[in-house]
Image (cartoon, helix red, strand yellow):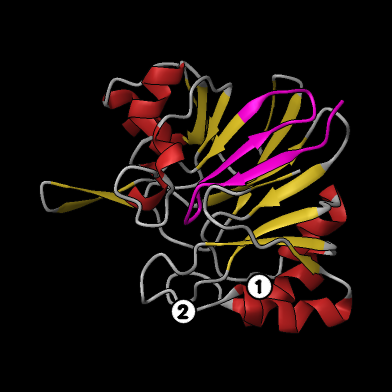
Amino acid sequence: MSKLSITWLGHATFLLQSPGGKKILLDPWVTGNPASPESAKTLGALDLILITHGHSDHTADAVAIGRASGAQTVAPYEVAVWLGSKGLKNVTGMNPGGTLQALGLSITMVPAVHSSSVEEDGKIIYLGVATGYVITFENGLTIYFAGDTSIFGDMRLIGEMYHPQIAFLPIGDLYTMGPEQAAKACELLGVKQVVPMHYGTFPALTGTPARLRELVEPKGVEVLELKPGETAA
């Protein structure tokens, strides 16, 4: 098996290629995403799409990409129902605490501290709770994808139960954790590598990987900072 391949497509959108060759898209927002590279507009075949919550900067392209790719889409239950109402097929709804076995992967939905909604015709439609994912790949590597969240104490429990090696954490501040909270999250989770996300897309998202690095590298945590479109393996 090869290593896990991580491509950042800007904001909180990632394309992963598992050690077994499965292609997984997380929180699909590439159309209208100012941080998304042109290469993200044509992703080709996908095996799985994972969505953490309903906000448009995480779901805007879910229906179009899901239809084009035919991939199975996994989302919090209310988001899954909403996507189905938009005509998307092959959608699986979950709730925090549940584990799905799919494509040789183990996918556990975990809590996040955030809101979840979409806006239609000028009205807010609430779509259940925001979530994160713990994903264990074919070779046993486990990652934690936090979605949008504040820090919360049960991140320690996620670390104790699932032992993720890599954490994908928002650092932009204002709507999510900033670097200081993300640094503490790394400690609670016990990870040795962190991938920052949800920063710099808009002026309001002021947290930076440089600040995160200042806080965690002295404690032995590596910051994997990617440019939009860049791949690390």
Verify CB contact (< 8 Å) between mark 1 and mark 2.
Answer: no
Which quadrant of the structure image shows residue 7?
top right
Is 186 within the magenta?
no
Q: Position of residue 79 (x, y in %)?
A: 40, 38
Magenta stretch in the rendered image:
1-23
Residue that sits furthest to the left in the current view: 121
Which quadrant of the structure image shows residue 191?
bottom right
Disc ID at residue 182: 1
Up-down relation of residue 70 to residue 32 (above or below): above
- In what element is the residue under mark 1? helix
Is 16 within the magenta?
yes
**Residue shown at 55%/73% (left/top)?**
177
Instruction: Of the two numbered discs 1 and 2 on the same chain, state the one appearing first in sequence.
Output: 1
Question: Label 1 sits on what residue type?
Answer: Ala
Q: Position of residue 226 (x, y in %)?
A: 62, 58
Q: Nearer the viewer, residue 58 or 226?
A: 226
Q: Give me the C-alpha separation between circle 1 and circle 2.
A: 14 Å
